[in-house]
Amino acid sequence: MDTKRTQRVADLLVHEVAQILQRDVKDPRVGFVTLTGAKVSPDLHYAWIYYTVLGEGAVREETKKGLDSARAFIRREVAPRLQLKSLPDIRFVYDDSVDRGFRLEELLQEIRHEPDEPDR
């Protein structure tokens, strides 16, 4: 169960990490990444930041490697901005909900375009 504090820290993390990714991370593997949310453990020791990226498996893997490579830098940059006693250990997790949404939309389109069977 998320408390107000953990949710507030998660929201702040997403905001600050998004700014750092946009302005400061120069790794070419980290292209057009969209942060979709975050979850912070109740003790504030761990944070899972969810992201999505357009592209197939190879693009996702390269983006994951780039984000993992930039983790220490991002953590260093976030620390003074959040002003917490200890900053959570940040982990990046691919958010597949967008992919599932696209797949669901495809299935709905297929259903709409199927011809109706005649009544017997």
Image (cartoon, rainbow, N blue to C red):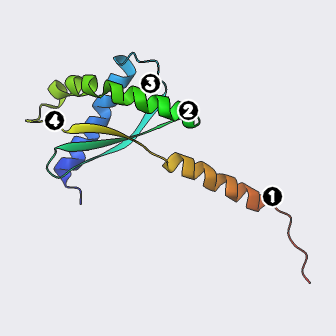
Q: Given the image, on which type of amino acid does mark 3 rest?
A: Val
The residue shown at (11%, 35%) is: 84
Label 2 is placed on what type of residue? Ala
**Residue wearing tag 4:** 87
Earlier sequence position, callout 3 versus callout 4: 3
Are the residues tagged 3 and 2 within 8 Å (C-beta)?
Answer: no
Viewer-proximal residue among 26 and 101:
26
Q: Residue furthest left?
A: 85
Quarter of the image holding residue 30? top left
Give the position of the N terminus as an image quadrant.
Answer: bottom left
For the residue carrying disc 1, how many other residues have a C-alpha within 10 Å: few (<14), some (14-19), or many (20+)? few
Residue 17 x, y percent position in the rendering = 31, 30
Q: Tag 1's secondary structure?
A: helix
Question: Residue shown at 82%/62% (left/top)?
Answer: 114
Is residue 51 in view? Answer: yes
**Residue receiving disc 2:** 58
Looking at the rendered structure, the secondary structure element under dot 3 is loop
Q: Nearer the viewer, mark 3 or mark 2?
A: 2
> CB of mark 3 within 8 Å of CB of mark 1?
no
Residue 30 has which mark?
3
In the picture provided, is 111 more to the left or to the right than 69? right
